[in-house]
Image (cartoon, helix red, strand yellow):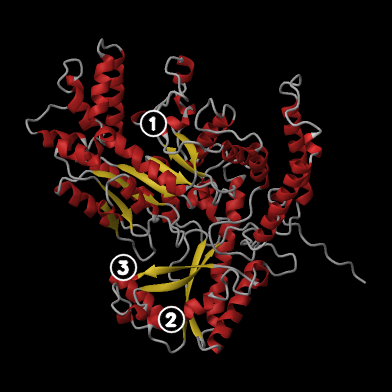
Amino acid sequence: MAPRPRRRRNTESDFLAPLFLGAAAENEATLERLLVAFLRDHVYWRRNFHPEDPPVIGAAEQLAPAYLEANARTEQALRELSARLKRSVPLYSPRYVGHMASDLLLPGLLAQLVTTLYNPNNVSAEAGPVTVDLEIEVGQQLARMLGYATDPRRAPAAYGHLSSGGTSANYEALWLHRAARLYAPAAADALGAEPAFADLFPARRADRAGTAWRLANLPWPRIAILQAGIEERLARHADAAALRARLAAARVERLGMAGFLARHGLAAPVVIAPRTAHYSWPKAMQLLGLGDAQLWPADVDAHMRLDPAHVERLLRRAWRTRQPVLAVIGVLGTTEFGTIDPVDRLVVLRESAAARGQGFALHIDAAWGGYLSCLFRDPRGRLVPRAVLRKSFRYFPSAAVHRAFAAVCQADSVTVDPHKLGYIPFGAGAFVGRDRRLTGFVGQRPVYLYDEANPAQSSERLGQLGDYILEGSKAGAAAAAVFVCNRVVPLDSAHFGRICAQTMHASEHLYDRLIETAARLAPLCRLVVPVEPDTNVCCLAVNPSGNRALAATNRFGRALYARFAIGHAGAPQGSEFMGSHTSLMRANLKDPDARRIARRLGVDPAGFVVEVRDADRQADHLFLLRHTLMNPWLMHASDGRNYLDRYCEYLEQAIRATLESGA
């Protein structure tokens, strides 16, 4: 009998195998061994801090009935918790293709569990002396991943820190950029008449509003230079304390938005964001007192990417109506479709607007797609050419996507979430700024955390996180998790990029398989991917053959999704595959794009409307099955069939069963 041919080793599987606990906890022994070892190490640390101190819990107390009863209650409560947790979503499984969550990187998980025993608080270097340093280094790691310069001896030098998630990082972006954008009018108001400062400001006009309008539109470099000049002169001014107090009293942070705008005769600043932007942006506008009416939606194209031409029209409109533009938001990986906005063209718009005297910040919400930057940066931080990347993929990256990632390093700030494509435990978002001088425009220094008389502490401001970020107490364990992960798997194409590449291969494979499935099911229904994937999120619409009504399409889609919903079979273990859903809103589509999608589905284009009077019609949106393809084992095929092939087989069965049910 001829020997069986040896199966070719999967080098990517070899690379991934030690990095995750695994869908069946294959790395249980490693997790247990390391966790127990570092638990014992922590215990030894406690015992040897001051070994001469007597124990605070005596041996007799540990034998008391009340002590034993408390231990029993703790164990019982934990058993009940563990039983409840078995009904959790199995995010680690390749059978889960739903929301933006997956298995966790083992180095980060261990680092977070171990560091939690020490419970550091990164609100300041005093409260978390070890993990604050780690968090500052994490900010530098993320900045380099995005292509930013980090050398503190040259401006701009980037900085970054962790947050509870992308939402809070987005809030912080607007908070910081508002502080910087409205600094110059306040400084001119407070110090412009002082002889020692007058030459720092442009010639003042007789009308206060005209001066304020011009100063509220300074480009960022001039704002930073202005503040540096003011601080330099204040440092040697005899009445520095009084002048600082006067400047503080003129700031928007003291007067509030209504008082500041009225004082300067300015209209409320606006923020321009794509219609596909995350729901955190209207909340940010509300929280900052700007009002979500000042959030101007910019159109998107057929690919759900921000339309730069419409952004330009909105900028011109703001210029004509004399409304300051606080920021333009681009998205690097939309929540619904994973699409990539044209960051490169937004950079051009920022520079052309600055040339006519209209300054604004460019912020990129890369909560989802930020980590894909690893694919675009080699170990030396250089941009990987598109031609090199294309050798590894079937479709990715398009020329537009490559240009967008190449331009991220020119944005003023970026939101990125390690707890998404960084495979770090929740919650670990991050804010990264291109220029650390941005931190100098805000500050809260409570006396119980900061000692202004201590020059050593005051000189290293980046370590005093609570001074310049929105959050107060923050877990140092999250910083340790990200730091250790980035040390084990560096953020470049040769290391972490290999994990990202797995997700892109999965996306391309699913896209091709859906086309094949659509061909097989053509007599029964139409399967349409309305937005071709830019990254690793793929959405699908299904319309039964012969149906022309979009409302019926959506009802069928919801009935089909019920077969992928968590717990539809009574418990997660009863689910073959689990997914998520979203909707493509008609209001976000231009008329030609809406008609094109309707025709592809085989529904009446006239029935796809922006506003619905009859709520039962369900015709103002298109219901979609949404697949987030971030699990590293989706393409694992130990038995000859990978999980995406299995998924498509189940999808076909689910469609047939839903059709037979008459839904």
Type of the residue with mark 1: Thr
* Residue pictured at 65% horizontal, 45% vertical: 109
Q: In the structure shown, which secondary structural element does the residue marked by tag 2 occupy?
A: helix
The spot of residue 4 in percent (x, y) is 86, 67
Type of the residue with mark 3: Ala
Q: Residues within 10 Å of mark 2 (few under 14, many from 20)?
A: many
Q: Which residue is mark 2?
A: 553
Q: Which residue is mark 1?
A: 439
The spot of residue 442 in percent (x, y) is 35, 31
Can residue 64 be spotted in the picture? yes
The spot of residue 610 in percent (x, y) is 29, 72
Residue 404 placement, left or right of 260: right
Quarter containing the N terminus:
bottom right
Task: Tell which circle, 2 or 3, labels the residue nearer the N-terminal end.
Answer: 2
Q: How many marks?
A: 3
Quadrant in the picture for residue 415: top left
Measure the alpha-carbon separation of dots 2 and 3: 18 Å
Q: Residues within 10 Å of mark 3 (few under 14, many from 20)?
A: some
Q: Which residue is mark 3?
A: 587
Type of the residue with mark 2: Thr
